[in-house]
Image (cartoon, helix red, strand yellow):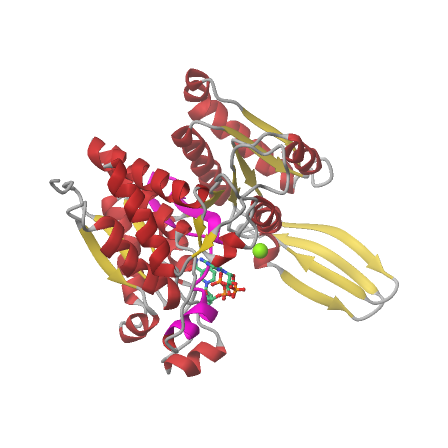
């Protein structure tokens, strides 16, 4: 078989630990035998980030801006223990944070559904994608421990010197206080990413907040979403037969539980933090969750939602066998290849992505899986395999379908 050609480079971002090992296996077994891979490679492994003072991360983000599509392996976010382990010059910021800031994007997380791995909520038949606004609110707060009796005020001094002042609370005794903020520009860009993404996957979009209680703050989120929808997306949504609606966060939660899935749920920062963890555990496993960062101007970066699986890596280093699930990383590649194919009009590349996904799901459905899935599957008589044998089993199915 002749290898599939690619016209435009895909930005390939390598990472750390066990996922770096899987990355190479996936390329060797599932990609390079069939595709003449045209990638621009950025090594975001921690040693390279340290060597370049993290410039490599900035370069990778700019490459995604240039080419429009990237695929990323999980990376270590350094903490004190990692500083010692890797003898780092400094405690670099989270690479995902840096990429998100440069791309000004939103992260969409989607579970991978497959036969034999059932969601806890039995009504869910299709994936629910969650979009989290990753800027501001409680994550950029200013907090104060109120020591005792006194008055808390909200004061804003505008550039021209006008001062607006409101009393928050007259404390009679000790308590706590916090200030949070957000920006129209960030909310607008979040809204655009959500509408564009929903259109690209042809699904309805839900947005929820608590505007009955927070009339000005959450009210502004609601208002911006509605304005962006009416002015920029309504016609396209209607043409595609898609719906956008806003509802209160409590109503959204109730509806999500009763739904069959198959929509995009946009959440404010804190709601998205909490509900993405709820959805990923309810759908089965973090190892079966993909993630895509979408900028408002339509650049896409695909990755697995899990981390570098450090515990398995240390076993691997000791020469012990691992059974690490590569599904989310494989789907990061297929997502990126399909998008590259879509943008380049390369239908062979798109068809390959579909076949690789089908081969992966088929492997699990026919009873061959890694340990994390073997522990939760509803299938009987399954075979638990090691990291490489799982990928090789997928390759067998893939070969048969090509
Ligand atoms: P993790 O890598 O997600 O792994 C936590 C545990 O979840 C593992 O020990 C394993 O459980 C299970 N698990 C996760 N992915 C799995 C897979 N593919 N197959 C099988 N089991 C899997 O989280 P972590 O150990 O807390 O973090 C390790 C490093 O990842 C950290 O340095 C962190 O900074 C980084 N991280 C990166 C990203 C990213 O790049 N997007 C995201 C999160 C964390 P068992 O050990 O019980 O088998
Ligand atoms: Mg969380």
Quarter where residue 258 is shown? top right
Question: Can you give x and y, in whole percent of width and height, for residue 230 in the image?
Answer: 49, 23
Q: Which quadrant is home to the C terminus? A: top left
Query: Could you tell whether 108 is left or right of 49 in the image?
Result: right
Q: Residue at x 38, y 31 (%)?
A: 200
Whether the magenta-drawn stretch holds residue 173 is answered as no
Quarter of the view holding residue 399:
top left
Confirm whether residue 297 shows in the render: no
Q: Where does the magenta region start and end? A: 287-316
Instruction: Pick the residue in front: 200 or 234.
Output: 200
Q: Determine the quadrant in which ligand 2 lies.
A: bottom right
Give left or right: position of 123 versus 189. Answer: right
Identity of the residue drawn at 87% across and 66% down: 173
Foreground residue, 303 or 140?
A: 303
On screen, residue 119 versus residue 21, left or right, reads right
- Asked whether residue 219 is in view, the answer is yes
């Amino acid at each position: 078989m002749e290898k599939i050609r690619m016209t435009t480079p895909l930005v390939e971002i390598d990472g750390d630990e066990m996922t770096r090992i899987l990355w190479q296996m996936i390329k060797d077994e599932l990609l390079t035998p069939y595709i003449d891979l045209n990638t621009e490679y950025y090594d975001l492994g921690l040693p390279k980030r340290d060597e370049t003072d993290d410039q490599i991360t900035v370069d990778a983000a700019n490459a995604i801006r240039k080419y429009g599509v990237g695929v990323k392996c999980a990376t270590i976010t350094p903490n004190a223990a990692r500083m010692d382990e890797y003898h780092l010059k400094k405690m670099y910021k989270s690479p995902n944070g840096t990429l998100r800031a440069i791309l000004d994007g939103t992260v969409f997380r989607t579970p991978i559904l497959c036969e034999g791995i059932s969601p806890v909520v039995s009504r869910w038949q299709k994936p629910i994608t969650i979009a989290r606004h990753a800027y501001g609110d409680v994550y950029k707060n200013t907090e104060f421990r109120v020591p005792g009796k006194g008055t808390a005020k909200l004061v804003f001094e505008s550039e021209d010197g006008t001062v607006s002042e409101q009393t928050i609370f007259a404390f009679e005794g000790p308590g706590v206080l916090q200030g949070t903020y957000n920006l129209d520009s960030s909310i607008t860009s979040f809204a655009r990413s959500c509408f564009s993404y929903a259109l690209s996957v042809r699904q309805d979009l839900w947005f929820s907040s608590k505007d009955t209680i927070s009339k000005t703050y959450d009210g502004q989120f609601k208002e911006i979403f509605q304005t962006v929808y009416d002015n920029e997306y309504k016609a396209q949504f209607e043409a595609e037969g898609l719906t956008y609606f806003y509802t209160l966060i409590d109503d959204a939660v109730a509806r999500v539980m009763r739904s069959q899935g198959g929509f995009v749920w946009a959440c404010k920062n804190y709601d998205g933090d909490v509900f993405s963890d709820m959805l990923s555990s309810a759908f089965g496993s973090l190892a079966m969750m993909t993630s895509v960062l979408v900028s408002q101007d339509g650049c896409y970066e695909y990755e697995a939602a899990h981390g570098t699986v450090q515990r398995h890596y240390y076993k691997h280093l000791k020469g012990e066998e691992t059974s690490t699930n590569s599904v989310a990383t494989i789907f990061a590649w297929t997502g990126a290849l399909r998008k590259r194919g879509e943008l380049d009009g390369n239908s062979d590349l798109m068809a390959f992505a579909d076949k690789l996904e089908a081969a992966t799901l088929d492997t699990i459905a026919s009873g061959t899986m890694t340990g994390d899935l073997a522990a939760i599957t509803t299938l009987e008589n399954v075979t638990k395999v090691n990291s490489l044998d799982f990928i090789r089993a997928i390759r067998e199915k893939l070969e048969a379908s090509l």
